Amino acid sequence: MVHITKKDLDKDNFYKDSGINTTEEITCDENLGYIKFKKSVITTKSIIFGLGDGIEAGDGIEAGDGIEAGWGIEAGDGIEAGWGIKAGDGIEAGDGIEAGWGIKAGLSIICRGILKFSYQLFAGTCIWREITEEDLIVGCGKSETDGKIVLGNLKETGNVPEEIDNIKIIDGKKYKLVEDALNVLDEVEAWEIK
């Protein structure tokens, strides 16, 4: 288990290493505030931050199991959990948010990319103050879910950040790489982006 204590944080609450990549569960002491990482936080198990704790990552946050924080969850890139994602405050991602089960947030849920979950999503569940319309926002570039938004108001922008790694410029034209993960195509194809 990776357990974070106050002595693992600098004066600005940044973790001693730029990020974490482990096969162990990640936990922390209570009441540490927002624990900040310059890069990604990745585990094949769960990330469980308790009362008075939140997580901020400069890059992505990924857990093979679930992600839970007493306060908010924020990532410069995407947030992904094999099980559920739960935050006492809001959840925000620079790219997409994906949960194998469901998502629950005390305040709004915002991502620039694709929002995916399998069962239920609840936004604006806070009990420490009256909620506003802003607290109920479930904002995303695009929703691709079989699940149901039980509490919250979906607002899709229709704008999904391009995957820069899959964009190639050839002779001044942009092409998107189409990967054939299922070996369905007989040859590599590229689509010109206009």
Image (cartoon, helix red, strand yellow):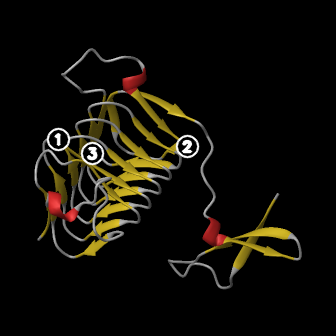
Counting residues from the start of the chain, the first of labels 3 and 2 encountered is 3
143 and 35: which is toward the camera: 35
Q: Residues within 10 Å of mark 1 (few under 14, many from 20)?
A: some
Instruction: Give me the C-alpha separation between circle 3 and circle 2.
Output: 18 Å
Counting residues from the start of the chain, the first of labels 1 and 2 encountered is 1
- Give the secondary structure at mark 3: loop
Above-or-below relation of 188 to 111: below
Quarter of the figure that contains the C terminus: bottom right
The residue under the point 52% across, 49% down is 113
Q: Which residue is mark 3?
A: 102
Residue 44 is left or right of residue 180, and the answer is left
For badge 3, the amino acid type reads Gly
Instruction: Give me the C-alpha separation between circle 1 and circle 2.
Output: 30 Å
- Give the secondary structure at mark 2: loop
Q: Are marks 3 and 2 in contact (CB under 8 Å)?
A: no
Q: Percent x, y for residue 64? A: 25, 66
Residue 81 is left or right of residue 1, and the answer is right
176 and 40: which is toward the camera: 40
Instruction: Give me the C-alpha separation between circle 1 and circle 3.
Output: 22 Å
The residue under the point 61% across, 53% down is 161
For badge 1, the amino acid type reads Gly
Above-or-below relation of 12 to 52: below
Q: Which residue is mark 2?
A: 141
Question: Farthest residue toward the front?
Answer: 11
For badge 2, the amino acid type reads Gly
**What numbered label is drawn on residue 52?**
1
Question: Farthest residue toward the right?
Answer: 171
Question: Farthest residue toward the bottom?
Answer: 186
Q: Residues within 10 Å of mark 3 (few under 14, many from 20)?
A: many
Q: Percent x, y for residue 193? A: 78, 61
Above-or-below relation of 43 to 180: above
